[in-house]
Amino acid sequence: MPKRALSALTIGLTIDICIVAFTACGCTDTCDGVYHPIYKLADCQKSTNVFKKGNTVHYEHSEGFEFDLTVSQDSTFMEDWSDFCVVAKEEDRSVLLTSTYPIMSVEVNFYGGINVSEEENKNNLVISHSMPMHISHKNTGFFVELDSAGNPEEMGIDGTVRLLDTITFNGVTYDSVFAIMDMAHYDALNYHKQIESDTAFLYFSKTAGILRLETTDGASFTIKERGDNE
Amino acid sequence: MNKFSTATTLVALTLTLTSCGMFDVDDPYVGGDFAKLVQKEQEWGDTVKVIDNWGIEDSYRERIYSHKPEYFEFEAHGFLNEITIGVRVECDENGGKMTVSCLRNLRDVNWPYGPDIVFKDLDGNKMTNNDGYTVRMLDSIAVGKKTYKDVLEFDATGAEESSCNFDKFYVAASDGLLRIDLQDSITIERKP
């Protein structure tokens, strides 16, 4: 699982520690001055109502069929990882949305980014406040930082995370919807590269969840609320 | 020198032929009708289009490798449906072993296959293992208007705790994926 949750602040802090203990840190087999953060999930990552177990949303697929996605798994667990003078414990939450048929799934992962390590707090080290969310379906992934209210933050490269005042899908209008660019194309923009696939967007709102998900091979599915849609 | 050359050639030939089923009964081989899976030298991959009885279309990326007469390997991955099928046949002194794998844990991308489903000492045309899974060799089946020969049927419906997200699949030794049955009433078939 990619460690994209490691925030810029944490990386910078790690480098600072390693500079202090340069002779051993990251350049040889041992590492003095190892950093031991404990990253916890923020409240907004733990309590996203749209991803409650059992919640079901109906979608229309670009291939012409309709299906339901149900939150079938929701688990929170601690992960241990180490990387370049950092030995960390991280609280993660993993949510799985599945459909009965066709057999499809969407993974939603939240990575703990609130450093609660007393050891580091005592040393007045910079505290990380990262609240990332990662959503993936087939070969397409979307990564975004959340603010304390649980909304995606418009940060990074312009236009890659956009707040839309309103948008209509299948006859229903939603407000406060974020359009999030897929990770592969975000990275391509960041590194000034070109990749041969369609740019995909995830349309997400804190209150309605996944409204539309596009994949880089051109497919998509869009929320279709039952009832008077037209 | 002549006799020496002849003897050397015979020894070399003996060693060469000491692979599956070509020398004597103690050599590794694939038993029963399952030997039909290892009758050909082939290595290829393609994308096969399928359609189910709801009218939903999908494609499967498949790959076959077989080395006569000792090894057969098949893999297929659905694009729309998250279905993965793996079959491997290996010869041994007791008729060989077949290993079938199917997707269980949708989330673990490092290990896309579930636990191995193993059939040992292949013999006859039908085997059921201790967990209740069954494999059977069919002379042929018809899919659409076409008939395919030497077809392997895998059936998970008899397993008490199936690790597969489908009920059955049918794979032809030379043609690849033919059909998948799932959820009692859904049939996914190769498009003509």
Image (cartoon, coloured by chain):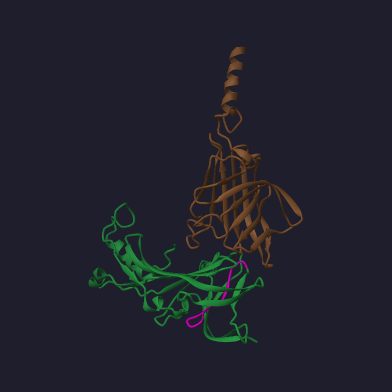
**Horizontal and vertical percent for residue B68?**
63, 37
Number of numbered discs on residues? 0
- The quarter of the picture where the N terminus of chain B appears is top right
Q: Quadrant of residue B21?
A: top right
Of A35 and A90, the residue lying toward us: A90
Asked whether A34 falls inside the magenta stretch, the response is: no
Q: Is residue B20 above or below residue A54?
A: above
- For the record, the magenta segment spans A204-217
**Quarter of the C terminus of chain B within the rendering:** bottom right
The chain painted green is A
Q: Which chain is brown?
A: B
Residue B83 appears in the rendering:
yes
Coordinates of residue B147 in the picture (x, y in percent): 74, 51
Q: Nearer the viewer, residue B125 or A73?
A: B125
Q: Quadrant of residue A169?
A: bottom right
Q: Nearer the viewer, residue A130 or B35?
A: B35
